[in-house]
Image (cartoon, rainbow, N blue to C red):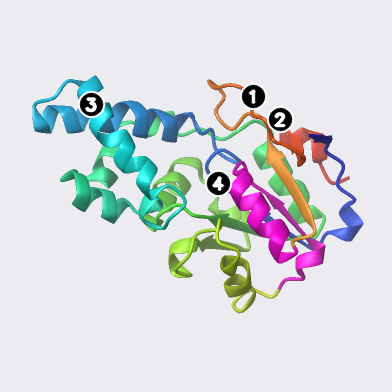
C-alpha cells in the first residue's frame, strides 16, 4: 500500500464508485449478510443461519458477474422483492465523511466527475434519493447499461465509446481491488483504493494500490 498522492494537474476526469467508496458499505453488508437471509428464512421456514448456509454459496457463485449486482435476478432467484427489502433498511444508507466537500472541490477544480457503479439502477435510484448526491456528477454511469461489470476490462473500452475521457488522465477511486486491477489493465492512469469501505468492518489489505481512509486526504486545492 502506498500513501495517496494525487497530482491534480495531471487529472481531467474522475470516476467514483458508489458502494464502499462514496457510501458506507455497512448498508450493503447488512442487507446481504443479515436482512436477506432473515427474510428468506421467514419465507422458507428456515432459521436465519440455515438460510445463510443455503444462500451464501449461491451468492459466491455469481460474484463478479452482472447477476451479482442485479436486483431483478435475485428477486427472481429468491422469490423476494429485493428492491422493497432494501427500502426496509434504507435508514442505514450513509455517505462517507468528507464526500460532499470532495465533490464540491472537484467541481471548483473544473474536473469531469462521473459516478461509475456496478449497482443495479433500482439500487442507484434509491441511494441517490436518500443521499441527494446525484447533482454533484456530470453523469451517472450504471454498468448494467454496458453489459459487463467493471471487473471486466472490456467495460472501460465500452465506456470510452460513450464518454469522452483520456484514460491516462483519469482517476478511478474504488473499493474493489478486482475493479482497480481491471482499470489498470485497460490503462486508467490514476488508481486509488479505499482502506475501510465498511465503517463497522476492518481496514482492508489494498495490496500495492494507493489508498485513503477519507477523501479529506486528497482534496484538490
Task: From the viewer's side, name the closer residue of 106 and 197.
Answer: 197
At horizontal 23% and vertical 33% (from top left) the residue drawn is 54
Circle number at residue 38: 3
Quote the CA–CA distance across marks 4 and 1. Answer: 18 Å
- Give the spatial CA distance, label 1 vs label 2: 9 Å
Which residue is at a point 84% across and 46% down the rendered structure image? 220
Q: Which residue is mark 2?
A: 213
Q: Point out residue 165 in the picture as x, y percentages from the top left corner.
A: 72, 71
Q: Is residue 68 within the magenta segment? A: no
Of residue 139 and residue 57, the one placed in the foreground of this image is: 57
Tell me if I can see residue 83 in this picture: yes
Residue 221 location in percent, x, y? 88, 45
Which is nearer the eye, 126 or 156?
Answer: 156
Q: Which span is picked out in magenta?
A: 165-187
Badge 3 local density, few (<14 within 10 Å), some, or many (20+)?
some
Mark 3 element type: helix
Of labels 1 and 2, the one closer to you: 1
Q: Nearer the viewer, mark 4 or mark 3?
A: 3
* Mark 4 vs 1, N-terminal side: 4
CA gap, disc 3 and disc 2: 31 Å
Residue 108: x and y in percent read 79, 54
Provide the secondary structure element on which disc 1 rests: loop
Residue linked to disc 4: 18
Residue 9: percent from left, percent from top: 91, 57
* Sequence-first tag of 4 and 3: 4
Q: State the residue position of label 1.
A: 203
Image quadrant containing the N terminus: top right
Amino acid at each position: 500500500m502506498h500513501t495517496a498522492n494525487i497530482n491534480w494537474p495531471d487529472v481531467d476526469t474522475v470516476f467514483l464508485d458508489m458502494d464502499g467508496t462514496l457510501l458506507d458499505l455497512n448498508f450493503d453488508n447488512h442487507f446481504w449478510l443479515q436482512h436477506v437471509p432473515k427474510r428468506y428464512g421467514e419465507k422458507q421456514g428456515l432459521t436465519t443461519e440455515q438460510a445463510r448456509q443455503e444462500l451464501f454459496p449461491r451468492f459466491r457463485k455469481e460474484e463478479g458477474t452482472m447477476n451479482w449486482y442485479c436486483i431483478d435476478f435475485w428477486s427472481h432467484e429468491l422469490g423476494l422483492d429485493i428492491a422493497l427489502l432494501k427500502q426496509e433498511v434504507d435508514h442505514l444508507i450513509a455517505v462517507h465523511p468528507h464526500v460532499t466537500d470532495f465533490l464540491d472541490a472537484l467541481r471548483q477544480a473544473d474536473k469531469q466527475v462521473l459516478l461509475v457503479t456496478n449497482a443495479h439502477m433500482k439500487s442507484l435510484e434509491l441511494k441517490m434519493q436518500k443521499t441527494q448526491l446525484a447533482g454533484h456528477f456530470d453523469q451517472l454511469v450504471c454498468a448494467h447499461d454496458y453489459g459487463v461489470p467493471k471487473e471486466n476490462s472490456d467495460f472501460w473500452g465500452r465506456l470510452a465509446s460513450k464518454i469522452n475521457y483520456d484514460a491516462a488522465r483519469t482517476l478511478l477511486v474504488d473499493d474493489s481491488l478486482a475493479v482497480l486491477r481491471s482499470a489498470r489493465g485497460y490503462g486508467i492512469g490514476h488508481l486509488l483504493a479505499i482502506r475501510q469501505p465498511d465503517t463497522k468492518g476492518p481496514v482492508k489489505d489494498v495490496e500495492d494500490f494507493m489508498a485513503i481512509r477519507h477523501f479529506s486526504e486528497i482534496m484538490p486545492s
